[in-house]
Image (cartoon, rainbow, N blue to C red):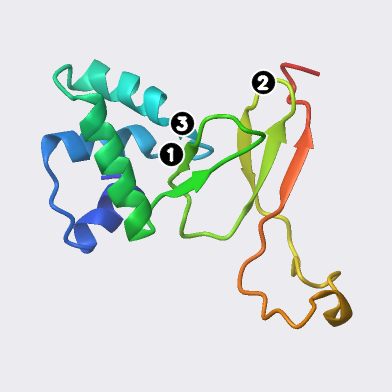
Amino acid sequence: MSDLLERLRNRGWRMTAQRRVVAEVLDGDHVHLTADEVHARAARRLPEISRATVYNALGELVALGEVAEVSTDGRAKRYDPNARRPHQHLVCSRCGTIRDVHPSGDPLAGFPESERMGFLVSKVEVTYRGLCPSCA
């Protein structure tokens, strides 16, 4: 059983065949699929799955906090099952490939109090951009 499926079972998420296949498609490292990509892969496993069912399942997974929506440069939203482990993203400026990265250290360490303008910072999102090996 995958990590995402296990987390969903532990939360008591009703596991229909359609929901299961969506979770299976999303499982893995460096997975950042669009809703259409999730639907296409899910339909290979379960041909009768509808696009609406995939969108609904993705919305529920995001609402549960088990999957994160990732938006980069006006491209289609992508869905990241690595929502439980803090990380940043490395994005190819040409093809849009996204990889999870886990730099060490506190991302707020270089952000002085004087620049926070009184904000109590609760979350940091960092995106590294460059060219992937295929595009370089």
Horizontal placement of 39 versus 80: left or right?
Answer: left
- Which numbered marker is on residue 95? 2
Q: Label 1 amino acid? A: Gly
Q: Nearer the viewer, mark 1 or mark 2?
A: 2
SS class of the residue under badge 1? loop
Which circle's residue, 3 or 2, is located before the other in the chain?
3
Horizontal placement of 116 versus 96: left or right?
Answer: right
Badge 3 is on which residue?
33
Q: Label 2 amino acid? A: Cys
Crowding around mark 1 (Cα neighbors within 10 Å: few <14, some 14 to 19, many 20+) is: some
SS class of the residue under badge 2? loop
- Which numbered marker is on residue 103? none
Badge 1 is on which residue?
28
Structural distance between the alpha carbons of marks 3 and 2: 13 Å
Crowding around mark 2 (Cα neighbors within 10 Å: few <14, some 14 to 19, many 20+) is: few
Which circle's residue, 1 or 3, is located before the other in the chain?
1
Q: Label 3 amino acid? A: Leu
Structural distance between the alpha carbons of marks 1 and 2: 21 Å
Tell me where residue 93 sits by quadrant. top right
Horizontal placement of 87 versus 61: left or right?
Answer: right
The residue at 39%/30% (across/down) is 35
Horizontal placement of 96 versus 129: left or right?
Answer: left
Tell me where residue 48 sits by quadrant. top left
